[in-house]
Image (cartoon, rainbow, N blue to C red):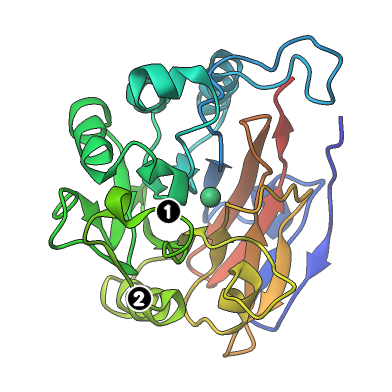
Amino acid sequence: MRRRTFLRQISATGLMIGSGLSPALALGTSDTVSLTILHTNDWHSRIEPFPMDGGRNAGMGGAVRRAQKIATLRKELEHVLLLDAGDIFQGTPYFNLYSGELEFKLMTEMGYDVATIGNHDFDGGIENLANQFDQHASFGLVNSNYHMENTPLAGKVKPYQIIEKGSLRIGILGVGIELDGLVPASLTGETVYTDPIAAANKTAMHLKMEEKCDLVICLSHLGYRYREEKVSDLVLAAQSRNIDLILGGHTHTFLDEPVVVNNRDQQGVLVHQVGWAGILLGRIDVSFDKRRGKRCFNCANEWLG
Ligand SMILES: [Zn+2]
């Protein structure tokens, strides 16, 4: 398995990425609270594992295998967050037949907490997305840069969601890609795209300053990196403030470990993405020493196959 561990110390803020030791041991204190963030992106209706056709992903993935892995980890770990960065829909006949019902039911069964919207999640039309969400999803949908007041998703998609785990407050916001030219307007209705960096920074400031979140996570469907000048997770990270972790999607980028980018305040932001099709489950363990204001990040992705 291509599982990698890494050790890196960044900035003078006490933000530390490490591995080998359990996060609590690494900090050497009993005042720590541990949080495990599990995440997927672009799983694209891959409900079954890839067929055994000799292809590079043969036998990998599948919702059952993912559900089992998540259930096992939940038994072992103190606090678990389960997140998705969009493009849940489209890619197999299951979506064409059931319009996303299965995907949302499975994510609900697995106990997903929050997801953001990818461009393909509009593929059945915005009304379909709203209906499937209403009927079959018990997780939250976040996006802070699409204005959806005049669409069927009004009031359903929130700019952010706050989740409490033990004594921790975790703020989760979402950003989505420019839809013009990517999705026909007939499918997105009156959704209005606005600058994701401005929206993310405004929302993150609120989460950190007013809501006093211990960790701010941005679920992004912007894409990891582009050759041309276009907003991506790396661009967002460098221009951000108050965001600790960007969990991305869209470019189907497999990262063995998060990349660390200095933000506008010269603080490290972790950027991570785990490919596509649900064959790699992202895992980031964070331990918080609230008394000393230190946090330790550790990455341990899990291949599902
Ligand atoms: Zn996408």
The quadrant where residue 297 appears: bottom right
Of the two numbered discs 1 and 2 in the rendering, the one whose residue sits closer to the viewer: 1
Q: State the residue at coordinates (70%, 24%).
A: 304
**What numbered label is drawn on residue 183?**
1
Query: Can you identify the residue that label 2 sits on?
Result: 194
Q: CA distance from mark 1 to mark 2?
A: 16 Å
Residue beneath the point at 76% across and 53% down: 257
Q: Give, as a three-letter code, the residue at label 2.
A: Thr
Residue ranking furthest to the bottom: 265
Q: Residue 248 in the image: x percent, y percent? A: 57, 56
Q: Quadrant of the C terminus?
A: top right
Disc on res. 158 = none
Nearest the eye: 217 or 84: 84
Q: Position of residue 165 (x, y in %)?
A: 37, 46
Mark 2 lies on a secondary structure that is loop
Where is residue 269? Give x, y as percent. 62, 72
Of residues 118 and 34, the one drawn nearer to the viewer in this rendering: 118
Asked if 192 appears above or below 264 in the picture, the reply is above
- Looking at the image, tell me whether mark 1 or mark 2 is earlier in sequence order: 1
Q: Is mark 1 within 8 Å of ligand 1?
A: no
